[in-house]
Amino acid sequence: MADQPALTDAGRRDLLRTMVLIRTYEEAILREYHADKAPGFDIGKGLVPGEMHLSAGQEPVAAGLGAHLTTGDALTATHRPHHVAIAHGVDLLAMTAEIFGRETGLGRGRGGHMHLFDPATHFSCSGIIAEGLPPALGQAFALQRAGSDRVAVAVTGEGAANQGAFHEALNLAALWNLPVVFVVEDNDWGISVPRSASTSVPSNADRAAAYGIPGVRVEDNAVEAVWNAARDAVARARRGDGPSLIEVHTLRLWGHFEGDAQGYRSDLDGVPGRDPIPTYAHALEEAGVIDAGALEAIRAEASDRVEQAVAFAKASPIPDAATARRHVFTDSLADIPALRPEGAFA
């Protein structure tokens, strides 16, 4: 839009800085996750047991979107949440401690990497497909009622666009003119199912028309195009003009989860050449926006921040097993007498 601010060279450097920080973080989590699972991969072993879904390749979505949000805006994410959390300003130390299951984590080590909740930045995520859309609606409704110009954003995957919650959320957001932006990350794969085998339309952005709201698809995992689309959608929501839908054709560089051999993917040979970070860094160097020294400084800064977070997590205490019910369940029904009718559970 002509009346919206244009992306400056400083803004371009910030986009790259965010993308490099995200990738550096995911590479460190990858390293720590696999460090003690040898010689044979055992998903239940190690400092970080359980599934791990990393976002390498999807950095442009987080960086381009996050540039237009403040920590006062609400953001919900998917089971692959680290990139979006980092771009939204979630504390790196507390997030890493949560991933490692430590008492200093966002959820005191109870939630793990798919269940990150940060009230300070109004961030949340879940392992349930399309789960983040209804909470984003509730947050947008509260912000609207409060007369605020803050917005809510729901980031989800292309597979979630076939869930009922997706369509129900778009319908209600449009009906109530809520200040919410829906962002679909299309990485071509719903676990091992190609998008072509699960979705009947060429672009989920086309579905916006059914609800009378704007829809745009960003091709080629282009961070500046994401920045432009997010700029317009977030500004529209802040003005009180209602919801928008953005779909970004992004890239999953690594497996759906760590340990995924990806034997189902026929496109793997071409994936490294589509890596968005070296592509964007090269473009900025060619344009004279950044030089080799500045790029190295960005990488060094990211490495320092990430290694500090990993060290903090490793040095943090593991929750006492005796407190397993604390912060999760009440110790006794007597703690909630209003919910206990006389004679119930006798």
Image (cartoon, helix red, strand yellow):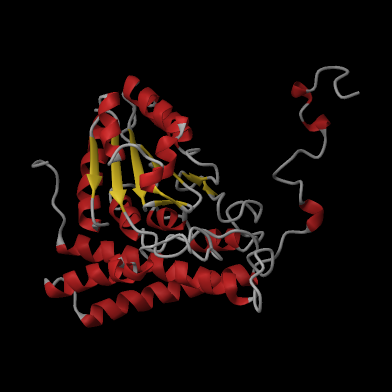
Q: Quadrant of the C terminus?
A: top right
User: Where is 96 relative to 198, above or below?
Assistant: below
Q: Percent from the top left, x then y, of residue 225?
A: 20, 52
- Near-viewer residue (253 or 264): 264
Residue found 76% across the figure and 46% down from its top: 325
User: Where is 292 relative to 161, above or below?
Assistant: below
Q: Percent from the top left, x then y, of residue 48?
A: 63, 65
Residue 52 position by quadrant: bottom right
Q: Is 100 displayed left or right of 120 in the figure?
A: right
- Near-viewer residue (69 or 183): 183
Residue found 27% across the figure and 40% down from its top: 234
- Is any part of residue 112 visible from this angle? yes
Q: Is 333 displayed left or right of 210 in the figure?
A: right
Q: How many marks?
A: 0
Query: Can you name the residue that lies furthest to the right here?
Result: 346
- Near-viewer residue (152 or 192): 192
Q: Percent from the top left, x then y, of residue 154?
A: 40, 40
Query: Can you name the residue that lies furthest to the top here?
Result: 342
